[in-house]
């Protein structure tokens, strides 16, 4: 027989799952409705089921190009963030140098700073060097926030690897690049997966920098979704369909790194 304590935990878990999934269900529900049905009243299921909203997004270049643009600069940012953070995290994990704690704290303060603070400097700099409205512009801007986060996550995983592994590899004749790539990185692949996931998610959902630093050629989906607001009203149905499609890349990434995220929670670094 189940104990009352177990039953309470099960009930709490069910309520939490229902609470967490309700907004997603409602967005999916709205994406298969027309605007007139959405504003007409409350309904748990679409009365007039339609794929028109998804057809609009997947056939209109101004819509689907936003997803392509977002995937491009998010991918660039994630790769650069992890590439830069790996040696930096190794240095913080293995060496002590003057001001190391202060530098580490300074990196984290960049992550805590609102993006609006850096908006004008980025805008002026990119306008001067000709990077405005490019994927590289947004990818580089997001490095300011993602690199500190990746360094912090990776440093925690690296600190859990015994130093004796480094010393043994050097005794066996491994050069540092060979040791780092062939031995060390596979040992912290869980940390790399977790760091890549959080870099991807921040860059994917960030709106202010992505919208300001782009206009046409690299405009992301989060900025294009704002065009559903017009003088004629809100295009709720298309916005809901766009929102559902925006969740898909994140869900795919979560699926591939789900085990790594669980390990990150277990290590207390996520």
Image: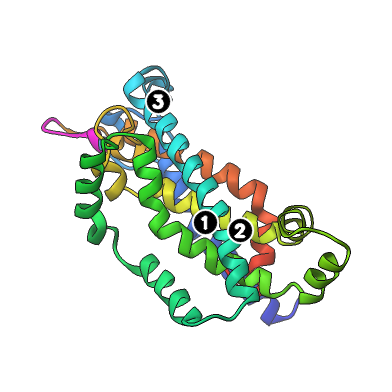
State left or right for residue 262 relative to residue 56. right
Q: Residue furthest left?
A: 231
Residue 221: quarter of image: top left
Mark 1 secondary-structure assignment:
helix
Residue in the picture at 38% in, 36% down: 135
Depth check, front residue: 97 or 53: 97
Q: Which residue is mark 1?
A: 198
Depth check, front residue: 56 or 169: 169
Q: Which residue is mark 3?
A: 64
93 in the magenta segment: no
Name the image quarter holding the N terminus: bottom right
Q: Is residue 204 visible?
A: yes
Q: How many marks?
A: 3
CA gap between label 1 and label 2 equals 6 Å
Q: Where residue 64 sits in the image (x, y, percent)?
A: 40, 25
Where does the magenta region start and end?
Answer: 226-232
Mark 3 secondary-structure assignment:
helix
Residue in the picture at 22% in, 54% down: 121
CA gap between label 3 and label 2 equals 28 Å
Q: As displayed, is residue 151 above or below residue 218?
A: below
Which numbered mark, 3 or 2, is in the foreground of this view?
A: 2
Q: Which residue is mark 2?
A: 194
């Amino acid at each position: 027989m189940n104990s009352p304590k177990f039953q309470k935990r099960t009930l709490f878990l069910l309520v939490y799952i229902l609470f967490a999934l309700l907004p997603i269900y409602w967005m999916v529900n709205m994406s298969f409705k027309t605007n007139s049905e959405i504003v007409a009243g409350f309904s748990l299921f679409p009365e007039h089921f339609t794929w028109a909203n998804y057809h609009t997004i997947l056939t209109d270049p101004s819509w689907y190009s936003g997803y392509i643009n977002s995937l491009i600069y998010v991918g660039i940012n994630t790769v650069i963030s992890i590439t830069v953070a790996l040696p930096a995290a190794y240095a913080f994990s293995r060496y002590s140098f003057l001001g190391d704690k202060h530098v580490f704290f300074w990196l984290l303060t960049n992550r805590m700073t609102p993006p609006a603070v850096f908006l004008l400097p980025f805008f002026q700099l990119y306008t001067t060097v000709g990077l405005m409205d490019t994927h590289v512009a947004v990818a580089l801007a997001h490095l300011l926030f993602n690199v500190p986060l990746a360094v912090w996550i990776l440093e925690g995983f690296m600190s859990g690897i015994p130093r004796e592994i480094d010393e043994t590899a050097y005794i066996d004749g491994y050069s540092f690049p060979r040791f780092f790539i062939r031995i060390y990185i596979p040992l912290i692949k869980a940390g790399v997966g977790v760091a890549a996931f959080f870099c991807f998610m921040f860059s994917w959902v960030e709106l202010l920098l992505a919208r300001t630093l782009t206009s046409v050629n690299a405009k992301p989906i989060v900025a294009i979704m704002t065009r559903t607001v017009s003088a004629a009203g809100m295009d709720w149905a298309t916005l809901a369909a766009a929102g559902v499609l925006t969740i898909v890349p994140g869900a795919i990434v979560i699926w591939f790194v789900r085990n790594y995220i669980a390990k990150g929670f277990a290590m207390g670094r996520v």
